[in-house]
Structure formats: structure tokens, C-alpha cells
Image (cartoon, rainbow, N blue to C red):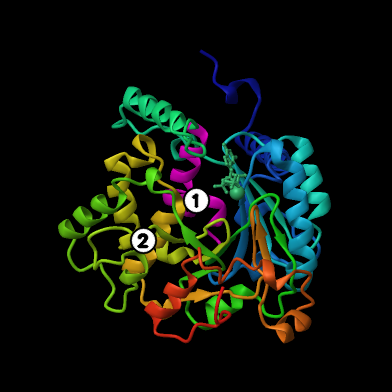
């Protein structure tokens, strides 16, 4: 059989040819994936002139949204508020994640609207958004039917359960979040009606905070019937994970017998990704245990109670911080600084009488009591 050399193609020429093919492939890949996470660290050009790849350090924060294509208008609305009140000054990047491919329309409109930072679009790996093998699908379906018949919000929804499981145990594993130390979760259709004078990511970093929240409330008991017992069994099997300065009493009123349903309202949360993803993280162990127990599908465990219980157990109380003056709105609750001076200083556009942060139905009073701090809210609700 004739070898390539014998028909006149020399090794040097083959190398040159391979080189050209490689360059063409690189140009193609760069163009094709310019909005994709795969090449995030090295390939996405800086947008708006504020964020350069070489600036990326471990302690940077990133805005993060899990969102559907159908929620484009709501997302654009949230982006407007975030830019006006925060990002026009601080220029953070924003990662948008979806279990389905983002449409071109979604990417283009978001990129056009989010001019104060860099927009990164991510498709969630299927293993982060599907049933693990140990789940009995018939049992899961029966539980959804029952929950729906009881009128539980999202009781019949499979998507909602995948969303809660993703927000509990997977978002922090996304490749796109690897370059960042802190995340700030933003949903479509939320509002910020006060200015940020300080960058919350700097507040987190400068104080070594692990978790920041803005509102608290009680969970629907029907969604988490066995979450607390499962947590107790986990703790018995895993000695030494509880922090010495924990906030256990934020989530239980009877010294651990039952869960009092208090949680940080996780549609707004700012967290230290290292806490979730470090090699010996108690959080990951806890999530794995909960996931095996199946309550994300056999019940309707939310990421808010899961995060809140974990923070209350595994994190020292001085690493949890209340971002009190965000003027944050997520249907149906509005946060509004109760102090008139603060409202003026931050140019808030809200009515303090409508504030939910310190409302008697919230758990905020309990938070301050457990922390041993003076309650900063109004004397009576
Ligand atoms: N990509 C994707 N995002 C989802 C899906 N379900 C929910 N989300 C997003 O996950 C977040 C939480 O979902 P929501 O439906 O707002 O849940 P919620 O805040 O408990 O419920 P509401 O009070 O109705 O807002 C939002 O940012 C949604 O856009 C889904 O199936 N796919
Ligand atoms: Mg929501």
C-alpha cells in the first residue's frame, strides 16, 4: 500500500495543514460558544469594558438567575432594577442558567439590556435536573397527585421539584460559577427600590460572611413533613458537623424536637460558594443525605428550608448577615427600610408601612433574639 510520503506529501506540509485546520477550528469554536459557559474562563470577551478575564479572582461575586425562556420580560424587568440600584456602580457579571437551551431572542435581549456587566448563559447539565436512580417514580407521581389535591402551591409540579433540588444541591457545581466566590440570587419580576451604597459582595468578603438574607418567613408545613426528622437522623450519623456558635434556635422552638418552619426567603440570598463546594463541606454531605431520603420528590422540600436549616446548624451565627435595607420586592412581599433617614439616604421608593421584613408573620424578630442582638424593627408590628 502506498504511504502518504510516497505520493509526495512531506511531514512538514502535513504539520502546516494540521496547524491551519487547528486555527480554523479555534476560530469556529470561539464564535460558536461565545455565549456559552464551556469556554468561560478564557474565551468570553469583556463587555462594557469593566470585567477583564485577568481581573477574575476567587473572591469575586456574581449575580445568578435560574430562569425560563418564557420569563424573558420578567427577567428584563429585574435587570432594569438591578442596574439602576446596584450594577451601574459595581459592574458585576451575571450568570443566567436554564434547564433548556436559551433562545437567541432571550440571549440577545438580555445582553442588550444588561449593559453594566457581562452576561453569561448556561445550559444546566441534565444530571442536575433529573430523577436520581433511587427515586421510585410511581411513588413520586402519587405524592404529586396528593399534594395537588390538597391545594398545595406547585403541589402537582415536577418542574418545581427539580428547581428546588437544583437550588439545594447543584447550582454551586455549575462550571460557570467556578471563577466566583459569592453568588447573589435574582429572580425574574423582582424589584429593588433603594440604592445600594455598598457592594453586598464587598460586605460579604470584608466580614467573611457566609450567608446573607433580606427577608424571613414560615414554610408551609405540608411541604416538609419529614425534613426535620431526616435532618436529625443525619446529625446523629455525622457527629461534629454542627458549628459551636450555631443558630439552631432559629429553626426550632422546642430545642430540636420539631422544625418551627422559619426560613430565609431564598429568592434573595447572597452566599459564599466555598461554603457549599469545599471538599469537606458539611453542606454537601447534608444535601447528599437529603437527596437519598427522596423528600425533594416524595414531598416538596424547598431550597429555602434546606439552606436555612443548613446555615443554622453548620455556620457560626456571626457569619450570617441581614441585608436589611435592600428595598427588595418579590411577590407578594416588599421590604422597605423603616428608618426615614435611611429611606432618604438610599432614595427608596417604597412605603414603610408595607414593609414585610419585620412583620409579625416573619421570623426576623426570632433571628435577632437568637443572635442576641437588639431588634432593629419597629416596636410593634
Ligand atoms: N429554567 C427554569 N427555571 C425555573 C423553572 N422553574 C422555576 N424556575 C426559576 O426558579 C426560580 C424560582 O421559581 P419560582 O417559580 O419563582 O418559585 P417561587 O419563588 O417559589 O414561587 P413564586 O412565589 O411563584 O415566585 C425562578 O427564578 C424561576 O424563574 C424551570 O422549570 N426551568
Ligand atoms: Mg419566585
Q: Quadrant of residue 277?
A: bottom left
Q: Quadrant of residue 191?
A: bottom right
Residue highlighted by disc 2: 309
- Label 2 Cα crowd, 10 Å radius (few <14 / some 14-19 / many 20+): many
Mark 2 or 1: in front is 2
Query: Picture coordinates of residue 112 (x, y %)?
Result: 83, 50
Residue 252 part of the magenta segment? no
Front one among 315 and 343: 343
- Label 1 Cα crowd, 10 Å radius (few <14 / some 14-19 / many 20+): many
Q: Is residue 111 left or right of residue 211?
A: right
Q: Earlier in the sequence, mark 2 or mark 1?
A: 1
In this view of the protein, can residue 180 be seen by the observer? Answer: no
Q: Residue at x 36, y 38 (%)?
A: 299
Residue 169 part of the magenta segment? yes
Assign ligand 1 to one image quadrant.
top right
* Secondary structure of residue under mark 2: helix
Query: Picture coordinates of residue 91 (x, y %)?
Result: 73, 68
Query: Picture coordinates of residue 317 (x, y %)?
Result: 39, 77
Q: Is residue 138 left or right of residue 239?
A: right
Distance from disc 2 to disc 1, alpha carbons, whole Å, reads 18 Å
Q: Residue at x 25, y 66 (%)?
A: 254
Residue highlighted by disc 1: 171
Q: Residue at x 80, y 66 (%)?
A: 84
Q: Quadrant of residue 35?
A: top right
Residue at the limit of the structure toward the top, as seen here: 1
Indicate whether 292 appears above or below 266: above
Residue at the limit of the structure toward the right, as seen here: 112
Front one among 322 and 167: 322
Amino acid at each position: 500500500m502506498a504511504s502518504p510520503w510516497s505520493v509526495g506529501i512531506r511531514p512538514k506540509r502535513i504539520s502546516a495543514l494540521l496547524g491551519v485546520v487547528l486555527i480554523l477550528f479555534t476560530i469556529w469554536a470561539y464564535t460558536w460558544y461565545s455565549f456559552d459557559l464551556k469556554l468561560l474562563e478564557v474565551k468570553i470577551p469583556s463587555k462594557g469594558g469593566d470585567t477583564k478575564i485577568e481581573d477574575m479572582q476567587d473572591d469575586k461575586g456574581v449575580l445568578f438567575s435560574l430562569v425560563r425562556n418564557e420569563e424573558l420580560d420578567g427577567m428584563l424587568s429585574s435587570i432594569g432594577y438591578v442596574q439602576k440600584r446596584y450594577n451601574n456602580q459595581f459592574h458585576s457579571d451575571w450568570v443566567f442558567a436554564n434547564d433548556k437551551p436559551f433562545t437567541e431572542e432571550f440571549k440577545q435581549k438580555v445582553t442588550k439590556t444588561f449593559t453594566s456587566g457581562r452576561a453569561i448563559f448556561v445550559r444546566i447539565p441534565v444530571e442536575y435536573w433529573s430523577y436520581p436512580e433511587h427515586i421510585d417514580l410511581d411513588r413520586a407521581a402519587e405524592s404529586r397527585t396528593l399534594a395537588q389535591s390538597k391545594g398545595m402551591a406547585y403541589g402537582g409540579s415536577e418542574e418545581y421539584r427539580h428547581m428546588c433540588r437544583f437550588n439545594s444541591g447543584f447550582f454551586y457545581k455549575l462550571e460557570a460559577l467556578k471563577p466566583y466566590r459569592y453568588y447573589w440570587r435574582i429572580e425574574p419580576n423582582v424589584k429593588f427600590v433603594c440604592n445600594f451604597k455598598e457592594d453586598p459582595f464587598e460586605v460579604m468578603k470584608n466580614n467573611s460572611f457566609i450567608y446573607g438574607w433580606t427577608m424571613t418567613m414560615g414554610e408551609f408545613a405540608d411541604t416538609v413533613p419529614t425534613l426535620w426528622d431526616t435532618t436529625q437522623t443525619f446529625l446523629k450519623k455525622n457527629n461534629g458537623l454542627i458549628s459551636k456558635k450555631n443558630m439552631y434556635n432559629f429553626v426550632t422552638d422546642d430545642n430540636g424536637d420539631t422544625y418551627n418552619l422559619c426560613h430565609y426567603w431564598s429568592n434573595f440570598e447572597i452566599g459564599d460558594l466555598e461554603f457549599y463546594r469545599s471538599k469537606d463541606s458539611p453542606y454537601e454531605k447534608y444535601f447528599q443525605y437529603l437527596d437519598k431520603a427522596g423528600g425533594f420528590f416524595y414531598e416538596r422540600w424547598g431550597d429555602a428550608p434546606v439552606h436555612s436549616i443548613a446555615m443554622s446548624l453548620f455556620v457560626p451565627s456571626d457569619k450570617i448577615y441581614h441585608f436589611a435595607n435592600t428595598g427588595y420586592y418579590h411577590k407578594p412581599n416588599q421590604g422597605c427600610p423603616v428608618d426615614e433617614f435611611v429611606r432618604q439616604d438610599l432614595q427608596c421608593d417604597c412605603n414603610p408601612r408595607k414593609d414585610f421584613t419585620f412583620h409579625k408573620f416573619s421570623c426576623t424578630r426570632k433571628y435577632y433574639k437568637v443572635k442576641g442582638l437588639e431588634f432593629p424593627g419597629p416596636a410593634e408590628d
